[in-house]
Image (cartoon, rainbow, N blue to C red):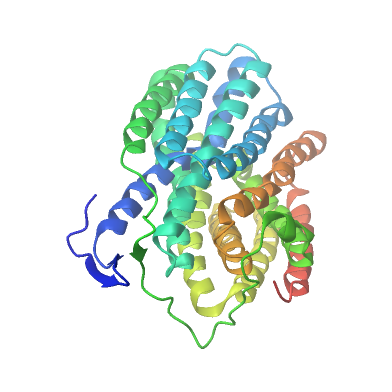
Amino acid sequence: MGDPNSQSYFVNNNTINVCVGNQRWGYAALCLVLYIFLGLIYAWSIFVPPLEQEFGWSRSETSMVFTFCMFFFCLGGLGSGFAIRSMPVKFIVAACALFIGVGFTLASRCASLTELYIFYGVLIGFGVGIGYNVLLTTMLKWFPDKIGFIGGLMLMGFGAGGMILGTTCAELLGAFGWRDTFFGIGVFYLIFFLAASFLLKMPGSNLVFPAKSASRKRVQESGGEVSTGQMLRRRSFQLYMLWAIFTVGIGFTLIGHGVPLALEVGAASGSAAALAGLISLFNGLGRVSGGLVFDHFGRKILMRSACLGLMITALLLFLTLREKSLTLLMISFSLGGMSFGFSVIAHSSVISTFYGMKHYPLNFSVLTMYNLFASFAPFLAGVLHTSMGSYNGLPFCILGLATVGMILAFAIRKP
């Protein structure tokens, strides 16, 4: 992808290229599409009803699939963080293609819950984690002057992928069944991501990018270039990790139980997937708008807004379950998805500004280990549903987690 609008000049006999044209936006467009396809991981609840119907599995058992998926998503991101330091981007994206493609094709032939845990939870989760980290790291390298916006744009695609592809997958499930749908997804992902891997690369060291635009309303926070070991010892990171666990745990729960929750409220089976898709849609919108909030107002406003939105979501869900109102469900899903998007985009923005870009790939992948703990939230919600026979206790759990998150957001004062 050449850039006809780039300019060159000499400084101390060295050629410096200034990236001012379309080259990096071409990479951004490609990565956005890739993120949309990676976002299919958020559409798991669409596959739950046909699997439970065929095998007779309980909600807590199928919820563990998403938990495994998020667990190995973290490990994939960590592996990607190490690999980026010594391997070209194309090889890492190719590995992502192999894990996801093979995972879906093998999952299409599974006959037991253990096989589903391994093929869908382990392989697909690991592959998505690899792609998630390497693509985001690549984009932040290409857009150091627009960290909040470009991170939000990429993760908007990841969040919206559940909505865009979830609806398509629901139609495929009805037409071909879950086995053929899984197999077709696996083949497509393998081919598409392998082809895309040949087009991506990191920016060269001879490129100079526009300076960051400063905002009077934003408090600039920077802790310098901080290594992973130093970051782990900082109180700011420890508190932020806890905040991420609580807020993302809420988001995972909404996504993992969106369809069955809609069915309990009274939605028809055909519209339950579309209603649950609102979570992914507004999750995506929340990521790009949250990136803009970070760029203009800073980390504090972004984190506190995310928690406030999740607290209101809990109250709306309480009213939704009491009144059996689909209108309130739509509002709560939309607000919950938006607030979840705010919390997710905070991660890349905070790590890059608090601890610098020199060690960003590994620092960010270490932070994403919050998923190891947050991924148990959907499972616990499934256990709660199984024990109570309904989702009536869920709003109180969400309210409690969001309240703790708000306290943590105020406790983080500096990098």
Can you tell which quarter of the image residue 304 is in? bottom right
Q: Is residue 410 left or right of residue 212?
A: right
Depth order, front residue of 364/242? 364
Q: Is residue 23 left or right of residue 358?
A: left
Residue lying farthest to the left in this orientation: 4
Q: Is residue 189 left or right of residue 307?
A: left
User: Residue, x 42% and y 70% (percent of image)?
Assistant: 145
> As displayed, is residue 219 above or below residue 49?
below
User: Residue, x 78% and y 70% (percent of image)?
Assistant: 407
Residue lying farthest to the right in this orientation: 387
Depth order, front residue of 408/325? 408
Can you tell which quarter of the image residue 267 is in? top right
User: Residue, x 81% and y 39% (percent of image)?
Assistant: 388
Q: How many numbered markers are drawn?
A: 0
Judge whether residue 326 can be spotted in this image. yes
Image coords of residue 362 (percent x, y):
61, 50
Image coords of residue 250 (percent x, y):
68, 52
The C terminus appears in which quarter of the rendering?
A: bottom right
> As displayed, is residue 186 above or below residue 302?
above
Residue lying farthest to the bottom in this orientation: 216
Depth order, front residue of 89/125? 89
> As displayed, is residue 197 above or below residue 172?
below
Judge whether residue 274 can be spotted in this image. no
Image coords of residue 5 (percent x, y):
19, 65
Image coords of residue 102 (percent x, y):
48, 21
